Each structure stands twice: as structure tokens, then as C-alpha cells.
Amino acid sequence: MVNVINRYSLKYQNLGTTRVVTQEAPSAYYTTNTQHLDEWYTPPNIISLVQRVLNEIDLDPCAEGNKNIPARSHYTRIDDGLEHEWNGRLFLYPPSSHPDKWIAKLQTEVSSGRVSEAVALLPAQTDTDWLNSVLKTQPVCFWKERITFLDANSQPNLPATQSHCFLYWGNNQYRFKEVFEPHGIVYLPIWKSDEAQQLPSNDEVLPVELTSSTKRRSRGKGTGRIHFRTVTKRNGKQYEQPWYDWELNTGSKTISRSTYIPKHLFNIILELEISKAPVNEILGMLGIIL
């Protein structure tokens, strides 16, 4: 799938180049400059992982002209995938300006029974309502590196400027975990469906019931969000490291900091943040007492 940045006509700075964003069609969002269309296609290594989870891809609802996703069917920007029914197993990489519309569409198609399995590639915007709503119920992998997408000539672009995550819908969540865990942090909520699989005894699965806070964050009780920093090892390899950005008024002063989230605590902190637990409760889990 090709992804294009932003929907509305405006100018913005990207690597020192002024680009103009225009809307070409209801579900197609293009970034143009005087030289070419600036397009981002899914790289082969990610397509391979998706195929290992789904076995086959029946539909790419956000396809572009070259249809680089090996799916049985494609909906291009001319077709407008939002206006059609989806069926079978699909890979979804929606336009980054309005992923909420595409996720809502996917949820509808899954609920209808038309879509049996799906993997979605999304920006890891944990401070948005549209992503938080599905993080509560769907398996997710927070990719540990910045993804290098391809351009229209199938050549690597610069690494993405933001982190990404993969979400899964279907009954093979442990297959998803097996395939994606070497590439990021995987979170498996306990499914409440009658079709939920037996939990392996050695699997680290975080029950939502055990981590949801009994309190909700109220106005004036601090703010926080999870974000990922790109860390470069000595060998030059990069990976994504989770941090918790927070601000809290202690009464005498306001403290703003960023705290590293250890891997063994990530699922807990993620669930607390999704449920908008008080910031001091989250800080307590991270060993910070104010």
C-alpha cells in the first residue's frame, strides 16, 4: 500500500523542502512538490511478516497503482475502499492523515464477519482516542525501529520520522506474537470471546482486569503519554525505546520529565495509560515517588 501524508491544502517543512498537500480523492491523500509525488510503500520485509501471519492476503483496501501488496484483490484511491465491503484476510496500511476512518471501517467489517483476519500498520499515536480504543482489545506490536518505506520506484526512502505499530484482528493471536515479537514489543490483551485460545503457561499476557485503574485521571492531576525514542547501538543498528513523558503539579511546583519504561513493565504502563490512570499511579509503577 502507498501512504501519503496529510489531507488538507497547506504548506509544511520536510527535510528543508516546502511541500504542498492536496486532496485528490475521498480516500487518497497526496504530498506533491515540483519534482514528484512523495509516496511511501510497504517494504518487502514487512509484507513477508504479514503473509506469515495470514498465510495469504485476500484484500489490500488502500492499494496504489502498482499494487505492491500481493493480495487477491485491491481497492485503489479511484475505487475508494471506504465505500466497499471488505472480505477475507486483509492488510491495512491507511493514509496517515485519517487512520481513524479506516480503523472504524475495519472494526465494522470484522464485526460483520466479512473480514476473518487482519493486520494493520499504523502510526504509534498512543495519545489519540482512535488508537487507544483498539489497543484495549487487540494484540499489538510496537515496532522497535523506524520503518524505511519505499518510494514509487521501489527504492528505500529515509526512515520514517515517527514510530509505528501493528495491530491484529482474528483468532491466531499467538501466531501474530510468534512472528512479530522478534521485531518489537508485543502486547496481548486477554480476549473475552468464546473463541479465545487457551493461554500457554509460559506466555506473558496482561489481563485487562488486573491492570485497569479504579480511578481516572482528572483535570489538574497531571498529563502523560508514551513515546518511543530511536536509540543507536555502537554497531550502528537502531531500535525504538519506550519512554513515559509526564507532567505533574505537586502543589509547590510543576515537574516535567521523561522516564524510561523497562520492557517488563511496558504492558502494565500501556494499560494504565490507556485507562487514563492518575499520573502519580503510573509513576509509582515506575518507581518514582513524589
Image: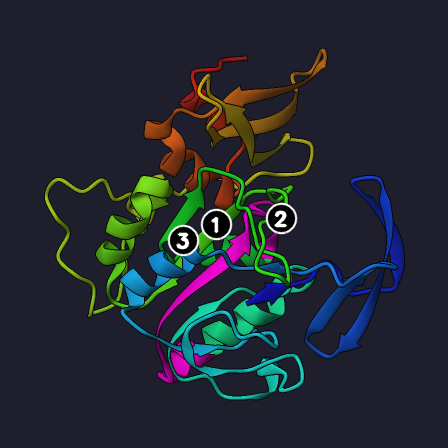
**216 lies above or below 223:** below
| Picture coordinates of residue 224, whole percent (x, y) | 60, 33
**Mark 1–mark 3 CB contact (< 8 Å):** no
Query: Residue farthest to the left?
Result: 201
Q: Quadrant of residue 19?
A: bottom right
**Mark 2–mark 1 CB contact (< 8 Å):** no
Q: Which residues are magenta?
A: 109-129
| Picture coordinates of residue 51, whole percent (x, y) | 33, 65
Mark on residue 144?
none
Relative depth, front residue between 14 and 106: 14
How busy is the neighbourhood of tag 3: few (under 14 within 10 Å), some, or many (20 plus)? few
Q: Is residue 49 left or right of residue 103?
A: left
Whichever of callouts 1 and 3 sits on the residue coming sooner in the sequence is 3
Does the segment drawn in magenta span residue 128?
A: yes
- Give, as a three-letter code, the residue at label 3: Asn
- Give, as a three-letter code, the residue at label 2: Asn
Residue at the spot of label 2 = 157
Relative depth, front residue between 213 and 100: 100
- Give, as a three-letter code, the residue at label 1: Cys
Q: Quadrant of residue 46?
A: bottom left
Whichever of callouts 3 and 2 sits on the residue coming sooner in the sequence is 3
Mark 1–mark 3 Cα distance, whole angstroms, equals 15 Å
At 40% across and 84% down in the image, what residue appears? 87
Q: Quadrant of the C terminus?
A: top right
At 52% across and 25% down in the image, what residue appears? 231
Residue at the spot of label 3 = 45
Residue at the spot of label 1 = 165
